[in-house]
Image: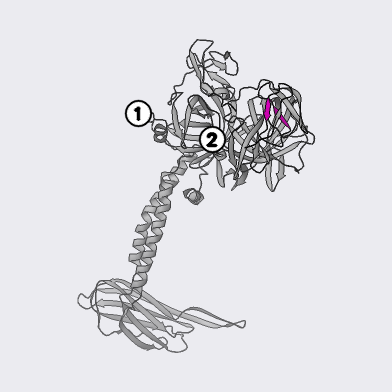
Amino acid sequence: MVAAPPLPVRALSCPHCGAAIEQRGFDHTRNVVCASCLSVLDATDPGLRVLRTFAQGLRVQPLIPLGTRGRVGGAPYEVIGFQQRSIAVDDERYAWREYLLFNPYRGFLYLTEYDGHWNLVRTVRGLPERRQERGRLTARWGGESYRLFQTSEASTDFVLGEFPWEVRLNDRVEVRDFIAPPRLLSAESTEDETTWSLGDYVTGAWVWEAFGLPGQPPSATGVFANQPSPYAAARAGLWRLFAVFVLALLAMAAVRFAPTPALVLRESRQLAPGAAEPYVTESFAVEGRRAALEVEIRSDVSNSWMFVSFALVNEATGRAVDFAREVSYYEGVEGGERWHEGSRDDRVRVPSVPAGRYYMRVAPELAPDAARPVSYVLTLRRDVPSGGFFFAAFLLLLVPPVWVTTRASAFESTRWMESDFAGPTGSAPRADDEEEDDS
Amino acid sequence: MTRRTANCPNCGATIEFRWSSAVQTTCAYCRSILVRHDVALERVGVVSDLPATASPIQIGTEGRWEGSGFEVVGRIVYEHDRGTWNEWHLVLGDGRSGWLSDAQLEYAVTFLVPDPPELPSEDAVRRGQPLRFHGARYEVTAVTAARYRGVEGELPFEYWDKHTVRFADLRTGGTAFATVDYSEAPPLFFAGEAVGYEALSLENVRAFEGW
């Protein structure tokens, strides 16, 4: 078999204005728009029949000139077509630009640009499954769930270059955008067909590099529908780090809680019903750094109450800390079932007690109607570990992940503000909805 | 490699068969369409001028599909409102016959399903209709009235005097793809997969100026 010669690029001239036209899309091109006079020409006609002239009311300059070649996914692609499309929201038009990329083997790709945000878009080779999830229409493709972001009616405002379809200015196409950042799944529907496409968010810097463009890309403003959240990844990382620190804290706490607190004082007493017998304990030493002192009462009170007033007095300064505790315990049998209420024991911590010599004034009082005397043991323990430090550390550790989570939520709010689901009811996804995007 | 040969009953040129089971072929010299009856070739028509399609695939292109090599031995060209497309006839290493369709450089590999599921009739087929096949949910995504534009090379059946043919394309939630071809009764059902160019490892493809 004789090898066919390379298929030539067609070099023609515009039948309307005479400007040179180079047909880069070979026989895939159906319509070509003259860069000079903007006439729409029929590329399937050998003489480039004029379809429309002076139809375009505006002229938009592409950021990537037609004929520019770049590399996408390791393969060369050439920009052969350019169009500006727009949607109307609340009487305001929002316009974006689309670049048609062509490789004679791999086919067509699109680059879209809106306010400095870019998407690399390819046709979907299947039919994403639409369904309702949590009351919101979603589309599933490639194992991923895309949430409906916006439904709009798009029209084509300006065209330039070549297209493998028939150009229709001011046509109306229903566009539904579903997002799973950094991807955007779009369905464009006419009466005859629905075309699905999948966009990947790319930065202007990526486009400039891929197409070797001079200068700087226009900077992106606002948050775009499928722009990846700069906080989402940091958020997941910080929460993981937080979990590690909390585990470390727990390990430290376990070590610190392990030693038995030092016994400072233990006294056993008896108290008769109705008696109020204040007394003073023996003097005792509190050593070490400023720490809490635990005061414990263990009694055998039954169907009665005991009230104890305490004063912890520093012998050197005379300064007293006053506090009072009560134990009450009731029990019985009712309907064949035992019941009880209250507790025979009580425990209280006197915080931040400095070292020094102390005594305690104790004023116990037993209910006058108590059936029998009460025995109780009063125990003082020093250096009872305090969770305060750990709690403070825990709170401090919470700050970075909470801050980033707040920023991430604010980013999502801004994103969804531009959707059909914006509003005071806050349809923005909850933070946990977005976790799956982090992976 | 030895290939079966025959002589064109019209011009006498040597016809070399790439695929021993071909039922129909075309003469590269006088462009006769030839149908094989046992050992003899019968001239049934002449190849019309095929529309330019700019497909990178050509007769003799080789590639791989699911671990098996294939060679492109023939094609059918169709035209519809939005352009033309090619159904390239593939012969796989194991002798199976398959199809590689190329519509505006969107590719799909399909095989004739000998025991198809119950198919909607040509008059009743509509976009959006569901169809279950091999456990997958298919949906009719396009119904196309195509004009038959011509043939080239070796085909597994006689196919040369068609006019318009209705097709229904079906897609799934993945890349599984199917086509119903209403050119025969009962209709033919082809099932396979929509694929990217890279996945086919094609060689001996067409050259394009500047690429």
Q: Nearer the viewer, residue A138 or B163?
A: B163
Instruction: Give x and y (percent) for residue A412.
Output: 46, 43
Q: Do marks 2 and 1 both belong to one polypeptide chain?
A: yes
What secondary structure is marked by label 2?
A: strand
Q: Residue furthest right?
A: B185
Task: Please report the bounds of the magenta region as a residue range.
Answer: B12-30
Residue B58 seen in this snapshot: yes
Task: Please give the name of the residue rendered at 29% of the width and 73% of the height, measured from the top-left corner.
Answer: A321
**Pointer 1: residues within 10 angstroms few (<14), some, or many (20+)?**
few
Q: Which residue is found at the position 34% from the left and 66% from the top?
A: A388
Please state which of residues A267 and B125 is positioned toward the viewer in this rendering: B125
What amino acid type should be assigned to the residue bearing mark 2?
Answer: Arg
Q: Number of marks in the image? A: 2
In terms of sequence position, does the residue under pointer 2 or pointer 1 come before the other? 2
Q: Classify 10 Å Cα crowding around label 2: few (below 14), some (14-19), many (20 and above).
A: some
Residue ID for mark 2: A122
Circle 1 residue: A215
